[in-house]
Image (cartoon, helix red, strand yellow):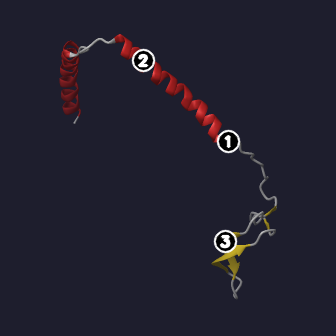
Amino acid sequence: MNALAALIAAILRALLPALFQAAKSTCEDADPNTELRDRLRERVRRTWTLIPIAFLLFAGCTRTVYVPDGTPVRLRETVRGAKVWVLGEDGMPVAGEMDLREGWYCLPEPPEE
């Protein structure tokens, strides 16, 4: 396996520089129109400087409030179809869905020790 990888690497080391040199010698500008080239470069430069500015303007501001773990929070709007665990007749948790109404308090269950 190592011999095969070494053979492929040796072939690539020999061929790639020759291919790049051949490509360089055959490439040339068909029409060295420097005025057009400069105008296009300036247009690209202006466009790429406007993109970050537009991103900052349209990203908007958001406010983040840190709520420590274990702190109860009050719902501001109804959460429809929330997946919840409810206790069944035998006292075991059962998966279910329900709407959590606006104004209800939610808090995490304390960790078991």
Q: Residue at x 50, y 27 (%)?
A: 47
Q: Nearer the viewer, residue 23 or 92?
A: 23
Q: Which residue is mark 3?
A: 80
Nearer-N-terminus badge (1/3): 1
Residue at position x 49%, y 22% from top? 45
> Disc 1 marks which amino acid?
Gly
- How many numbered badges does the structure rendering display? 3
Which residue is under mark 1?
Answer: 60
Q: Is residue 85 above or below residue 41?
A: below
Quarter of the figure with residue 58:
top right
> Dot 2: few (<14), some (14–19), or many (≥20) neighbours within 10 Å?
few
User: Is 93 on the left or on the right of 39, as rendered?
Assistant: right
Q: Splitting the image into 4 quarters, where does residue 79 fall?
A: bottom right
Query: Which amino acid type corresponds to the residue marked 3 in the rendered image?
Result: Arg
Q: Using the image, determine if residue 43 lies above or below residue 35.
A: below
Residue 16 at what x, y percent from top left? 22, 21
Residue 23, located in which quarter of the rendered image? Answer: top left
Closest to the camera, between mark 1 and mark 3, is 1
The one nearer the camera, 82 or 9, is: 82
Mark 2 or mark 1, which has the lower sequence index?
2
Location of the C terminus by quadrant is bottom right
Residue picked out by circle 2: 39
